[in-house]
Amino acid sequence: MKQSKNLAIGLGLGATISIIGLVAMNIVKKGVKAVEPELAAQASNIIFEKPCKVLALSPHPDDLDFFAGGTIKLLADRGFDITVVDVTDGEKGVNIPNLGSVRQYEQRRAQKVLGYQNLKFLHYPDMKVNYKRLMRDLRNIWYEVNPDIVFTFDHNFPLKFLAHKDHLAVGKAVCKLATEMDSPAKIYLYGSRKNNVLVDISEVLEDKTRAVLSHKSQLRFSKSLYSSTVKKLGSYAASGSNLRHAEAFRAFHNFDSFPMG
């Protein structure tokens, strides 16, 4: 702790933050690269085969937009019936009055950018997700939406700095429900370090960036820095493929998600 403090004093806070940011992005660069990138790019074709019902879970407002916003935009533009669920209001971490309400407003702005139809808030307290209650609520939503495709956080192989307990609880609950209900829905996990599906988001990269920037309460630095981060994430995910910018997922139903022959 003392060593970290001395480092901050010696280099200046800005330089320290920059170093931390570089280290984090290096971890992301290594983590998001897909296994067999070319095959992973082909594997995304099944997602867009025909318009259907999509359920997308976000532990906090902005999680989904950052890791899957481009894919959601592509699906919305193609007429898919999309329901996004924010599990918590993300009301901790920033000293802003009524932050939960602010973040709901920001999510609605992001919704307009991405163009999906339905948005639900479960209003769970940030960092205090009750797993049993979550299972019940998600089961009810699953029956209501009857999804063909589901997006959620990867609880088994998350990027190392994203192992937040809310992320893990939501991912675990979704995958457990899919198994218990013997659901035919295809499950795609974001924030993963074991990716086997790549979605080309080059044509909607600017829309994704605008959606991420809609979460103003979370922008601690300049907009240009966040725009650059979104673009870098996309290029890192596309590494090894012929895509410029991508979003990476781990297919939970692996046998359903890769093209055969």
Image (tube, rainbow, N blue to C red):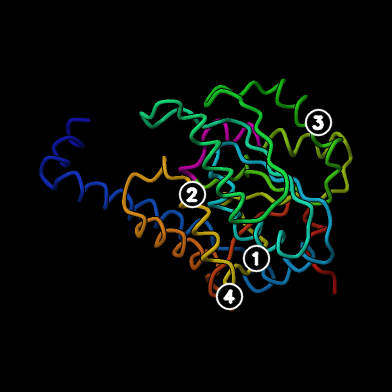
Q: Amino acid at mark 2?
A: Ser
Q: Which residue is mark 2?
A: 214
Disc 3: which residue? 139
Can you give x and y, in whole percent of width and height, for residue 104 in the image? Answer: 55, 36
* Quadrant hosting residue 146: top right
Between the residue at mark 4 and the residue at mark 1, the CA separation in whole angstroms equals 9 Å
SS of the residue at dot 2? loop
Q: Residues within 10 Å of mark 3 (few under 14, many from 20)?
A: some
Check the image and report above or below for 157 versus 143.
Answer: below
Look at mark 1 in the image and give the residue it sits on. 199
- Please tell me whether residue 165 is drawn above or below residue 196 in the rendered image: above
Split into 4 quadrants, where in the image is the N terminus?
top left
Q: Nearer the viewer, mark 4 or mark 2?
A: 2
Chain-order first, disc 1 or disc 2: 1
Q: Which residue is mark 4?
A: 243
86 relative position to 22: left or right: right
